[in-house]
Image (spheres, rainbow, N blue to C red):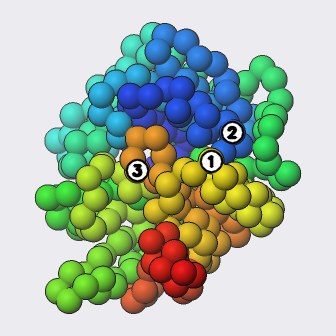
Amino acid sequence: MTGVTELAYIGIEALDLAAWENFAVELMGMQLADRKDEALRLRMDEKAYRWIITRGPADDLAFTGFECGSEADLRALVERLRNTGMEVAEGDAALASARRVGRIFVTHDPVGNRVELVTGLADADTPFVSGKLVSKFVTGDGGAGHEVLMQGAVDQQRMLDWYGLLGFKLSDTIEQELAPGMIAKVAFTHCNSRHHSVAIANMPFPKRIHHFMIEVADMSDVGFAFDRCMDAKQPFEMTLGMHPNDRMFSFYVRTPSGFNVEFGWGGLVIDVASWKAKRFDQLSVWGHRPPEVVAKLLA
Ligand SMILES: [Fe+2]
């Protein structure tokens, strides 16, 4: 069964594009591809863009683009989805052109998140240049990064089954009792050697997406980005720490739309063919403490 091969891009609807441009370029180290028609496109590598921020009231996830290896694979996937009764609409030439892809089909997951299935996200005409990173973003075969989606009122297994139809397989789960009777459960899934590209979380959070993870090739870039965010007084969700499953060394900072970017280094690369799903009982091995907890400890 051929499924999607990578998370290619993410779309956000945001109120404040100027704040987003500053956050993405000056704090995260992305490159502005262009700013037109009330939208920003942001680069992380040789691709034309990896993020599209469109002006609008939602301040939340607007869509996620997943790429297939070929047009034949995309058509086979769409046929398989339609055979399960799913509505999948083909995007027109204008949408394909706007997204800089060959073909595009659009559907929605059980929570209602817009999912775009595409081929051939184009390269930019110029090399990628970050004004901030000493290394580079880790993309390539592992795609743009990973996203953690909130399941809301939808059963977690239903979400996993749906993403399973796209080709996602379970990497592992983490269950941790955050407070008496309140158990956080996150299920992590992969579609390539990145430990996870999509995770589904049951925690209370007022957005469709808890965070999008972007990874850098040098640990120092995590430290430099941490300092840039501190100096800019950008609110943190969690300070530095490490997860037990993907071993990501990272911090979580709030985007201008209220959900988070996880800025990380050293994420686990898995052998997809031999991977066995595991279970963990803590979200972080160390750190990832909320800033108010850190402030009290250091007072
Ligand atoms: Fe993450």
Image location of residue 158, percent across then percent down: 21, 61
**Label 3 sits on residue:** 259
Between tags 3 and 1, which lies in front? 1
Three-letter amino acid code at the position of disc 3: Phe
Mark 3 and ligand 1: say if the CB distance to the nearest ligand atom is below 8 Å: no
Q: Residue at x 39, y 80 (%)?
A: 174
Q: Distance between the residues labelled 2 and 1?
A: 10 Å
Looking at the picture, does residue 103 appear above or below residue 145?
A: above
- Circles 2 and 1: CB distance less than 8 Å? yes
Image quarter of the C terminus: bottom right
* Corner quadrant of residue 278: bottom left
Image quarter of the N terminus: bottom left
Q: How far apart are marks 3 and 1 (CA)?
A: 17 Å
**Label 2 sits on residue:** 26
Numbered disc 3: secondary structure:
loop
Numbered disc 1: secondary structure:
loop
Numbered disc 2: secondary structure:
helix
Image location of residue 85, percent across then percent down: 17, 41
Looking at the picture, does residue 172 appear above or below residue 51?
A: below
Looking at the picture, does residue 204 appear above or below residue 68?
A: below
Figure label count: 3
Taking depth in this image into account, of 59 and 162 the one nearest to the observer is 59
Three-letter amino acid code at the position of disc 2: Glu
The mark found on residue 232 in the picture is: 1
- Circles 3 and 2: CB distance less than 8 Å? no
Q: Residue at x 29, y 86 (%)?
A: 177
Q: How crowded is mark 2: few (under 14 residues within 10 Å), some or many (20 or more)?
A: some
In the displayed structure image, the side of residue 276 where residue 166 appears, left or right:
left
